[in-house]
Amino acid sequence: MTLETDPFAGMGAARILTKMRKGFLWGGIVMIVLGMGAVLMPLFSSLVVELLIGWLLTISGGVAVVGAFSFRGTGLFVWELISGLITLAAGLLMLVYPVQGLIALTVLVAVVLVLTGAAQMAFAFWVRPIQGWVWGLVSAIVSIVLGGYIFAALPEASAVILGLLVGIDFISTGVALVLIARTAPPTLEV
């Protein structure tokens, strides 16, 4: 007797897509609606993201502190305990001071944009002999400019930037799911 744990085992991508077509369509519609809400209410959605991250850090920090005690008697105990306490403290600070946490997260987003832009630029110049390398350079410049803009607009930008980014991401994901669902055949001939 064999137990089949994967309901899609042995199916091709087209058949799986056909079976999940409605789920993709409705999931995409929900993502688009949520994304539009986040874009229309960026301060609210930014605070939701900040509080979610605050809770995740608080819970994971608490778990890490408790878990550190399993390392008592080893050289790792102090490091694990300190790491857990820092994560716990960061999460609690974000929950107690959400506006300042929002600023910290926005700075982090700006740093990530600048660093990824620099990495993209290095890559673009590395592939420079290949046709189309300019698109990599353009993408790098856009990332660096966005990161620089966020730095220049701080702290005012922190109130809305995370909500806008989450909203745009939800909308793009939703549109992709809807388009994938629309291209799937309604039925497959066997």
Image: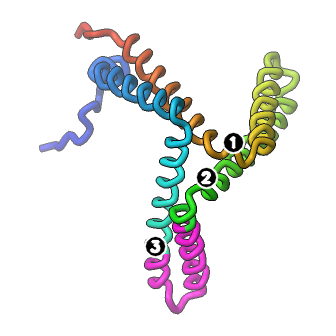
* Closest to the observer, 91 or 100: 100
Residue sitting farthest toward the bottom: 73
| Numbered disc 2: secondary structure | helix
Among the two numbered marks 3 and 2 on one chain, the one whose residue lies closer to the N terminus: 3
Which kind of residue does numbered mark 2 sit on? Leu
**Which part of the image, by quadrant, shows the C terminus?**
top left
Toward which corner of the image does residue 187 lie, by quadrant? Answer: top left
Compared across the picture, whether 144 is left or right of 58 comes to right
- Residue 91 highlighted magenta (yes or no): yes
Q: Amino acid at mark 1?
A: Ala
> In terms of sequence position, does the residue under pointer 2 or pointer 1 come before the other?
2
How many residues crowd mark 2 within 10 Å: few (<14), some (14–19), many (20+)? Answer: many
- Amino acid of disc 3: Gly
The image shows residue 165, relative to residue 189, as above or below, that is: below
Residues drawn in magenta:
65-92
Using the numbered discs, state the Cα–Cα distance from disc 2 to disc 1 in whole angstroms: 10 Å
Q: Disc number at residue 102?
A: 2
Q: Quadrant of residue 151?
A: top right
Residue 78, above or below 10: below
- Quick one: 154 or 30, which is closer to the camera? 154
Looking at the picture, how far across and down is residue 73, in whole percent?
A: 52, 92
* Residue depicted at 55% across the width and 84% down the height: 77
Q: Quadrant of residue 162?
A: top right
Residue under label 3: 62
